[in-house]
Amino acid sequence: MALQHLQQGQRVNEKMRRMRAMWQRTRSFFYDHWATLIMCILGLVVFSAFSIPVLAYFGFDHLSKQIYNAMHYVCGQIPSHSPYICGHQCGLCFRCTAIYSTLFITSAVFVFTKKRIQGISWWMLGLLTLPMAWDGITQLFGLRESTTTLRLLTGAFFGLGCALFTFPLVQKTLLESQMPLVRPAYSQGGSLVDRDENM
């Protein structure tokens, strides 16, 4: 009986060990590849937006409509503010096309430079956001009518600011969460591993 309980306990411990190992592998994967995953999501958004008119042109109306309806969660899709391909509306307006395209391109650069891009400050993000805010607010109150060029430019500035502010900040936060365990050689003081060895 005691042997049976011991074997059951060992099996439970083995399952717990496997679960912990799986959790560590999953956590390590997202820690190492979070930027790549976001880049792929942004790329999918941009690709889906331009696939809608192509699918509609070749007769896949049901599929293109489903994708178009799904894209409504990330864009207002105002017909007069949107690009058209082969007579069919894309899934994103001009401004959102610029935003998501810039986010995708900047995230790709961030990934392929091994996350070494320096981030910008919050006030720089504010400066890059101001043109889009001015363009949108003045148009909202009927003071002026925006143009396609302005929508593209202001959207690109906003997307660039968001990417340069957010991606390096997330990477810095993740690195700092590992600092108590292993401190870089150029920083002052020893790591916790070094302290343990000196005790």
Image: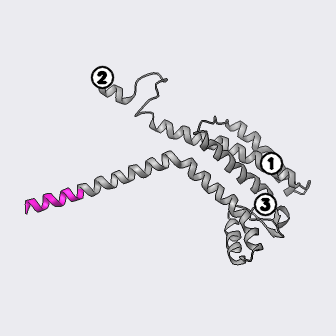
Residue furthest to the left: 1
- Near mark 2 (Cα within 10 A), the count class, few <14, some 14-19 or many ≥20, is few
In front here: 4 or 141? 4
Can residue 133 be seen from the camera position used here?
A: no
Spatial distance from mark 2 to mark 3, Cα to Cα? Answer: 61 Å
Q: Is residue 20 visible?
A: yes
**Which quadrant holds the C terminus?**
top left
The residue to which callout 3 is attached is: 93
Q: Are marks 2 and 3 in contact (CB under 8 Å)?
A: no
Expressed as whole percent of the image width and height from the top left, the position of residue 4 reads: 11, 62
On screen, residue 196 versus residue 92, left or right, reads left
Q: Where is mark 2, residue-wise? A: 198
Where does residue 33 sit, x and y in percent of width and height? 52, 48
What amino acid is labelled 1 in the image? Thr
Which segment did they paint magenta?
1-12
The circle on residue 43 is: none
What SS does tag 1 mark? helix
The residue shown at (68%, 45%) is 106
Label 2 or label 1, whichever comes before in sequence order: 1
Where disc 2 sits, the SS reads: helix
Tag 3: amino acid: Cys
The residue at the point 72 percent across, 63 percent down is 49
Q: Is residue 104 left or right of residue 171?
A: right
Q: Nearer the viewer, residue 110 or 192?
A: 110
Q: Residue at x 75, y 61 (%)?
A: 92
Mark 1 — residue?
154
What colouring does the structure picture have?
one colour
75 inside magenta stretch: no
Is the Cβ of the residue at disc 3 closer than 8 Å to that at disc 1? no
